[in-house]
Amino acid sequence: MKNVIRLSDKAKPVAIFDTSGNLAIKPGSVQVAGQAATFTMRPPAGELGAAVEVDLPANCYGKDCSYDITMEYSTNPEKCSAVQWLPPEQTAGKKTPYLFTQCQAIHCRSMVPCQDTPFIKAKYTANITVPEGLVALMSAISLDPAEGANGAPKGSTSDGKTTYRFSQAEPIPSYLIALVVGDLECRSIGPRSKVWAEAAYVEAAAKEFDQTEDFIQAAESLVGPYVWGRYDILCLPPSFPYGGMENPCLTFVTPTLLAGDRSLADVVAHEIAHSWTGNLVGCATWEHFWLNEGHTVFLERKIMGRLKGEKGQPGGGPMGQRYFEFKALLGLSDLKDSIEEFRTKGQMGFTRLVPTLGASDPDDAFSSVPYEKGCNLLCHLEKMVGGPSVFEPYLLAYVQHFQRKSITSDEFKGFFINYFKERGMSEQVANLDWAELFFGEGLMAWEPNFDSTLADAALNLAKAWLSGDDAAVESTSTDSFDSHQWEVFLDNLLQQDAPPAKATVLRIIEKYQFLKSRNSEIRFRYQRLALMSGCGPDEPSIAEAVCFLKEQGRMKFVRPLYRNMFRNPLTKQLALDTFQANRTMYHGVAAKMIARDLEL
């Protein structure tokens, strides 16, 4: 793999690489410009790993100094946090092993020596050799002819092994390097998109994500051309710890999105939005992560507003804007949950839009805060300058101005102020308290005022249950409720200072047949509600929660469920037993965070 290396400014020129997870560089293997070179492995710095300094020629200074650096190294399978190795029994096919990587935030350094910061972007090429019969994919364009089944790339085979070739011509940060190897099939879902998965669910994934091209085109209408060539989707095994990961050319998604009705496909719209906000314009350090995620949530909801609303209208017109604000209301519930969790842990610094991480592992600060608080800031700014018709052209200008760069919150601020001052809006932007916007803790200083039209029926139903108004409960028809309205209903119950009584929760679960739901978002919510109301292990809803924890490892679901189970005296031991029995199924990052949640 070739990479571009920044040099230190030391008197003795060295190239500095990040490593972690006992990554070992073979002695005598390091070369600079074809000549043997010495290197020094520095002592580990906790979760950040160990720096490797490669000595360079004495005359190597400045940006015009360029050398090829090569080295042989090996990873430690048990400590390489970027890679999860699945034995055959953990796959759908049960016949072959499976490998996938997850490099965000600072895990690429456990897989390859690199300068593992979002500030540095580089192109890469790679040759991946795997046992014959398995397929390798990367966050890059395949250089092999598409002669396999359904247009799959056909690598070169020799001695029982197949080599696949890849090139990423756009500069990307190290956390977007991605690799998967498995018994994979593909189906075309658009002129520039395929979906990849194991045979058992490739057809279901193709149906679930067949709106992909519509999402891409809606995004292009907002923020300009898609520059990455292909947009393929890989539906991973259930242990994948996130909803999606925006690896260029090959988005990773969780199978928990396979609801059968496309109701959870907006996660794909989110990952598509990252093609501009995050991948094309990204944060310089992880303290500024909201620049990636806040913009992407905002753009995702713009995309969905376009598709749900009126064509050709800014924001999708009134209908599109109502849908945008409906989703923002859902996100506000997630934000309140995250803030309360950090409050419980005494970590309110992580509720800032721009936290101070220092030497902390960025995984420790991961939550909905950069996503939802960031999106709320952009909503606030949009309303302040005059709405979508004014703000959407700014969003396009922002992407065009900073494309292929890594920036800070101050650079965002400077561009925003200058853009609107040049358009005669000095007064609107003059009185913004940027210190509060970036560093204020807890909820936003302003009160979000989202249109609740699409949520009102669900909110009123929750109110009726909470007040004991049985007549209102029985007179409310829920036949037309979609999954998002059920999410609003359950979120409202979860957000109460005290959960509803156990008997009430059991009636709700029975009346609306939640035990039969296959929608992961609904399952997650009613199971949390049951745990918070004091249900014990003998209740069917708790048995379902245990099943859900065994089925998948998406951190959005498993961490809150384990926390709620652990804090319920009746299920505390069940939480510990379930985790210990299934720990090896979870991705390393998820297992680490769950263990902390359970005070292990």
Image (cartoon, helix red, strand yellow):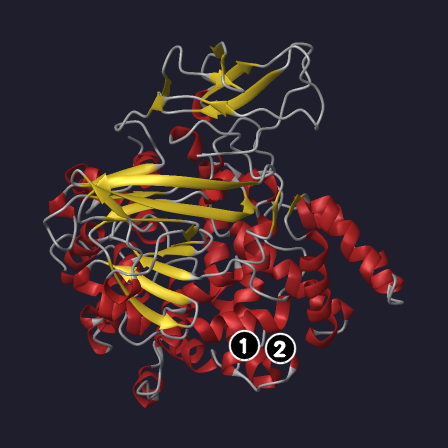
Instruction: Characterize the local packing of mark 1: few (<14), some (14-19) or many (20 or more) Cα atoms within 10 angstroms.
Output: many
Q: Which of the two discs, 1 and 2, labels the residue nearer the N terminus?
A: 1
Mark 2 crowdedness (10 Å alpha carbons): few <14, some 14-19, many ≥20: many
Mark 1–mark 2 contact, CB under 8 Å?
Answer: yes
Between the residue at mark 1 and the residue at mark 2, the CA separation in whole angstroms equals 6 Å
Residue 202, position as x, y percentages in the image: 24, 65
Q: Name the residue beneath numbered marker 1.
A: 305
Mark number displayed over residue 576: none
Q: Which mark is residue 315?
A: 2
Report x, y in % for residue 67.
58, 24
Residue type pointed to by label 1? Gly
Which three-letter amino acid code belongs to the residue tagged 2?
Gly
Instruction: Please indicate, yes or no, whether residue 452 appears anywhere in the rendered image.
Output: no
68 and 83: which one is in front? 68
Res 427 → quadrant = bottom right
Residue 586 location in percent, x, y? 25, 42
Q: Residue at x 18, y 36 (%)?
A: 580
